[in-house]
Amino acid sequence: MRRNRATSDLKSSFEIDYPFIPKSNLQLLPGQFWAIPLSNGRFACGRVLQLPPVNYSYGKKCAFFAGVMNWISTKPPTADSIAGSKLLAQGAAHIKAIHQTGKEILGYRSLGSDKIAVRLETNAAYPPCDVVRGFKIVRPATPSDTKKLNTKSTWGFRVPLIIAERILVEGKKVAYGK
């Protein structure tokens, strides 16, 4: 399966057989989702939010922007069952985050259908830094931005599972918004 980055957000640009285990981010599309099995026998949902630009150098074939959704069920997620779910947390991730928290991509649902967008963050805690939306630089950050926006995080392989467990199973609040 191949995809052209210029048409990567067009689901119709090629046929995809679900489920599949991605070998690189070249097989990913924003909107794809995977099941995150939880300790209580239920499932959470991870989503592909964004892919790095073509000129991205660090981890260009394995990096992507991931999200954990505010969704839990006794069955793995489907495009219909996750409709309307909101984003709990987001972060830059490695393709192994999918492998270690759910193994395979189960399907696709347009992020636009649920009004999901990568949130604005800063790429450092203190100026000088930039306001970013995932991998995309939006503008230079102001001191006010560093106070009110979260700092972009890079997730370890099991972070989507840890976030889902803490929020959806243990009911703990995770400090995401400032």
Image (tube, rainbow, N blue to C red):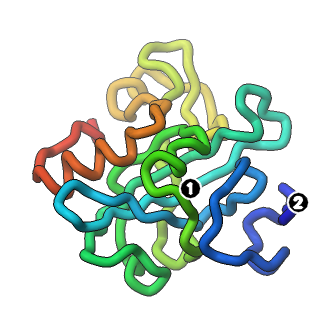
Residue at image point 39% right, 46% down: 160
Please provide percent x and percent y for residue 52. Answer: 71, 43
Q: Position of residue 46 (x, y in %)?
A: 44, 58
Tell which of 92 and 148 is nearer to you: 92
Residue at 41% in and 80% down = 83
Q: Contact, CB < 8 Å: mark 2 with mark 1?
A: no
**Residue at mark 1:** 49
Q: Is residue 126 above or below residue 163?
A: above
**Helix, strand or loop at mark 2:** loop
Query: Which residue extends farthest bottom?
Result: 80
* Quarter of the image where one finds residue 82: bottom left
Split into 4 quadrants, where in the image is the N terminus? Answer: bottom right
In the image, residue 152 above or below residue 102: above
Residue shown at the point (33%, 54%) measured from the top left = 88
Q: Amino acid at mark 1?
A: Leu
Image coordinates of residue 123 in percent, x first then y, are 53, 26
Look at the image and tell me in which quarter the C terminus lies.
top left
Say which mark, if any, is on residue 4.
Answer: 2
